[in-house]
Amino acid sequence: MATFPIIDMEKLNGQDRAVTMERIKDACENWGFFELVNHGISIELMDTVERLTKEHYKKCMEQRFKEMVASKGLEAVQNEIDDLDWESTFFLSHLPHSNMLDIPDLVEDYRKAMRDFAAGIEKLAEELLDLLCENLGLEKGYLKKAFYGSKGPTFGTKVSNYPPCPKPDLIKGLRAHTDAGGIILLFQDDQVSGLQLLKDGEWIDVPPMRHSIVINIGDQLEVITNGKYKSVMHRVIAQTDGNRMSLASFYNPGGDAVIYPAPELLEKEEKAKAYPKFVFQDYMKLYAGLKFQEKEPRFEAMKAMEIAT
Ligand SMILES: [Fe+2]
């Protein structure tokens, strides 16, 4: 079995560039996921973000999570739970507007670290989109422009902790889904594993690696590439030991961005248009109720709406 793709971004600057670009292409087409090392975000900043995220969980989130578990009797469940996830989360919005000041219990150091981290992730996301453009034969800036709409991209970070779970076979950390948006950049715990992706019908671990960033392709990139790049199912298995930290940053289209397969890719493939054209926020409305289902019926529903209008 092929091993999980790990991309060293430093190799994009030297004689290994062509091989590295080919590996990114293979990962986008066949895995929907890859893991980046030497991505340009400082190790010191990542360490600070990790420490402060874990401190924030202990101080502000853990008690609330324990109370939720107790109130729902989750410690003692006997049957599979399919309507909730064993996770504690909050969401930081960065673009088009930051909500950082609206979240009352963030200490100033944490706000600053997350602002710096988000700036690094945003830059990396845009760099990656241009590498994808290069591989796809699209002009530089095409994907960024496709996501832009009238107010620029939507960009935010879901901060999650997956506390130790007594029944990981009955309650998922996060149920299987594909991501609705554009490109997702994940800073995951380097000690506590749990993220898995579905490849050829099998669940494969996304290995924890210190200071790496895991990338995955969302539904919108699958649409724009007319299915060349894959948005794949993934899930988090809760662990009986250890608290898993996960910072997933979503670089998504603006709400009013119109998403459709890049005409250049359709011409090259000379095949009928397989994916629909729609306004991103309409897709998100549909996704809200169907997140934990396969993506194909969502694409079909958008296609039906397109024909009806
Ligand atoms: Fe996801």
Image: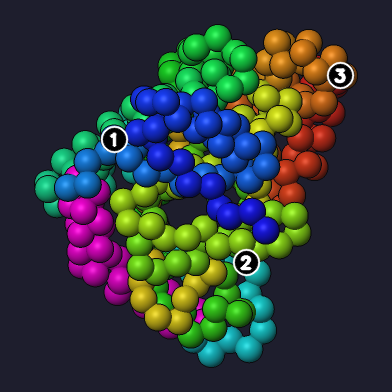
- The extreme front residue here reads 15
Label 2, secondary structure: give it: loop
Mark number displayed over residue 83: 2
Mark number displayed over residue 3: none
Q: Nearer the viewer, residue 133 or 287?
A: 133
The residue located at (85%, 14%) in the rendering is 270
Q: Is residue 169 left or right of residue 70?
A: right
Residue 232 x, y percent position in the rendering: 65, 47
Mark 2 → mark 3, Cα distance in angstroms: 40 Å
In the rendered image, which residue does mark 1 sit on? 40
Q: Is residue 33 magenta?
A: no
Q: Amino acid at mark 2?
A: Asp
In the rendered image, which residue does mark 3 sit on? 271
Q: Amino acid at mark 1?
A: Gly
Q: Is residue 67 left or right of residue 275?
A: left
The C terminus lies in quadrant = top right
- Mark 3 is surrounded, within 10 Å at the Cα level, by few (under 14), some (14 to 19) or many (20 or more) other residues, namely few
The N terminus lies in quadrant = bottom right
Residue 117 location, quadrant: top left
The disc, 1 or 2, on the residue closer to the chain's N-terminal end is 1
Asked if 86 appears above or below 268 in the picture, the reply is below
Label 1, secondary structure: give it: loop
- Mark 1 is surrounded, within 10 Å at the Cα level, by few (under 14), some (14 to 19) or many (20 or more) other residues, namely few
Q: Amino acid at mark 3?
A: Lys
Which mark is in front, 3 or 1?
1
The disc, 2 or 3, on the residue closer to the chain's N-terminal end is 2
Label 3, secondary structure: give it: loop
Mark 1 → mark 2, Cα distance in angstroms: 38 Å
The residue located at (45%, 67%) in the rendering is 193
